[in-house]
Amino acid sequence: MTTRPAKGTGGRPDLVERRFRACAPNRLHVADITYARMADGRFAYTAFVTDVYARSIVGWACATGMGTREPPLQASGQAISRASRHGGTQGLVRHGDHGARYIGTVCTTRVPEYGMLPSTGTVGDSYDNAMAESVNGAYKTKLVWRSKPFRTLGELELATFQWVSWWNTKRLHASLDHKTPQQVENEYYEHQTAQAASL
């Protein structure tokens, strides 16, 4: 599925420039949306938000429609809530593509409201959001295409919940020295606690 570009970029620069690295959690999130064909032939849509530091999926949502308040906004809400419990969202770069849902609703409401910095890549270039595209690809190859078509949104949501849990707590990532995202995050926070205790 090709993203439909929004008209104009709203002056949002590309703050990432294909450098998908972060020095800590909640510094850079990447977001995108993908789809799955349901048993009745309709499409369902799944939006993901991934924290770049540990490749952890920090927000996701599924819906059978693409209303502007649906998957991207819900996934962003989860990511914001999680970040708020771990240091906050001030200065967090929120990177996405030029899809109308992201440029419109998410970037004009949630991003500035929580002190985040909006970032978008160039139109029609998947490499500018490569990490988010990689999550989408893994979701489709490891879950959607290996399953029978989902009959209901509830079935898709349950399967997605289980897949996200596997991704964050069981899947070993080569880019993380063959650790899970949860291990990498835990190690970061343990190191921060140890540093604070030594002061």
Image (spheres, grey):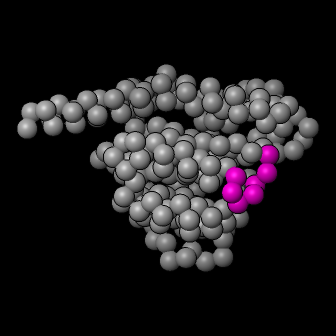
Which quarter of the figure has residue 149?
top right
Q: Is residue 6 above or below residue 134?
A: below
Q: Magenta region's main secondary structure?
A: loop
Residue 137 among magenta residues: no
Q: Residue at x 84, y 37 (%)?
A: 38
Q: Nearer the viewer, residue 30 or 133?
A: 30
Which quarter of the figure has residue 5?
bottom right
Q: Is residue 75 above or below residue 179?
A: below
- Where residue 32 appears, as percent x and y from the top left, is 60, 51
- Where residue 55 appears, as percent x and y from the top left, is 45, 39
Q: Is residue 150 above or below residue 127?
A: above
Q: Residue at x 79, y 36 (%)?
A: 153
Q: Which residues are magenta?
A: 64-70
Question: What is the count of numbered marks?
Answer: 0
Q: Residue at x 91, y 38 (%)?
A: 40
- Where residue 16 appears, as percent x and y from the top left, is 41, 60
Q: Residue at x 68, y 36 (%)?
A: 140
Residue 124 in sight from this viewpoint: no
Q: Is residue 35 left or right of residue 117?
A: right
Q: Is residue 157 left or right of residue 40?
A: left
Which quarter of the figure has residue 108?
bottom right
- Where residue 97 appears, as percent x and y from the top left, is 58, 61
Q: Nearer the viewer, residue 115 or 142?
A: 115
Q: Is residue 65 left or right of residue 80?
A: right
- Name the quadrant of the C terminus: top left
Residue, far right: 40
Residue 37 in sight from this viewpoint: yes
Residue, far left: 199
